[in-house]
Amino acid sequence: MTRAMVWFLVLAALFAAGPAAALTSITAGDMLITSRLMTFENNVYVARGGLKATQKDTVLIADRGIYDRTLELVKAIDNVEVTQPGSVLTSDYLEAYVKEDRILAKGNPRLTRIVERETREEDGTKTKKKTRVILTCNEVEGFNKENRFLAKGDVHVVEVPYREAETDEEAKENEKEPISDLVCETLELFSAEDKAIARNNVVIVTKTLRATGDKAIYLDKENRMIIVGHAHAYQTSREAPNAEEQVSELYANKIIYYPNEDRTIAVGNVHATVYPKGAKAPGDDKDKKDRKKKKKTAEGEEAGGDEAGGGKEGKRKAGRGTGEAGETSEGEAFAEPEEPSGDEPPAGLPPGKYTPVGGEGQEPAPIEAGSE
């Protein structure tokens, strides 16, 4: 093969690869859009060779996309990823409205943010730790000018410890044991204020708290979560470091939870019940027998006194005092009524036996707390 033929083949290969490798760039407002293969027709750009859009500190990539100059609308399709400092949003489809500086992500949207929080250790010392917050929902809308995100439909947020350089498999495994778990219908995130508002069928679960309500407001700078609207919570706590755990059930107009301090305050029409762990359950067989025996003895003594008076009521009570079926003056039989077993602790508490506050052998009475 001659040298001229070799050069011809090299040049032919370069020209053949040139159009596929070259990048085409266009601008949409202050957004720069590039693609390896882009066509233009009727004021619409179609990017088929990958899409990359850069706007300030935000970078969007996707397999393909469309930019409509007339509508000033960018559509990113398949394997969409939007990266901002400290957060990544992924989805199957995304629309970016250039004039409004607004985005709308659909198709399995997932927002991941790295946050740093101050936490209190068991010995009382405060340390700063990074955590990873993952949000999934049906649809995410972002308003860049307002620094606001709105997640809608089947919203689920989990917070897990952050680990440097963890693999995708390690991250998924880590998400199985979250620090906190939030479920709601809509969630608004205000980045500048470090505030989030969850609405409709809100359920919050941490290692020591399970709370429900119509709305929850989280203020990150104040380390405070406010639950309102049919607020109800179970809080696990210890009165002293070496004491047994106890669970408090709260109903109130407003429940305030401090995550870093693991502390809860109930405000307005408060109704509280405390279940100490390790106490005998109200349905314990031995306790029931002892209480029945005491009750029968007391009723027998009372019935004996009435019978000495010779009245019909005395005969009726005497029958009850023996615990056997008796007979009224009209000949109707009656039997000793069964003693109620007492209120059982609600489902979902940590393992162990619980006794509602009120004293052993007494009817459990809820603690009524005053409003703040």
Image: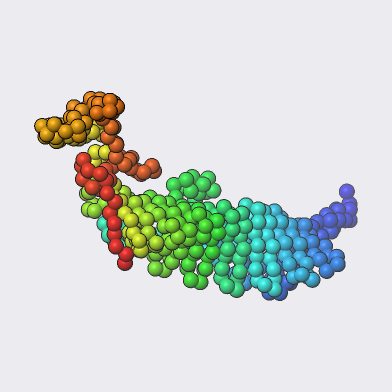
Q: Is residue 148 above or below residue 157?
A: below
Please name the residue shown 51% across and 71% down the image.
192
Closer to the camera in the image, 170 or 15 = 170
Please name the residue shown 28% across and 32% down the image.
337
Left or right side of 305 for 224: right
The colouring scheme, among rainbow, by chain, secondary structure or one colour, is: rainbow
Q: Is residue 136 above or below residue 324?
A: below
The image quarter containing residue 370 is bottom left
- Where's residue 210, x and y in %? 40, 51
Is residue 93 at all visible to an observer of this figure? yes
Q: Is residue 243 above or below residue 35?
A: above
Is residue 165 at all visible to an observer of this figure? no
Please name the residue shown 83% across and 65% down the image.
40
Q: Is residue 96 above or below residue 210?
A: below
Please name the residue shown 24% across and 28% down the image.
329
- Where's residue 348, x and y in %? 39, 43
- Where's residue 97, x and y in %? 69, 68
- Where's residue 64, x and y in %? 74, 57
Left or right side of 114 for 91: right
Left or right side of 290 for 256: right
Q: Quadrant of the C terminus?
A: bottom left
Left or right side of 68 for 358: left
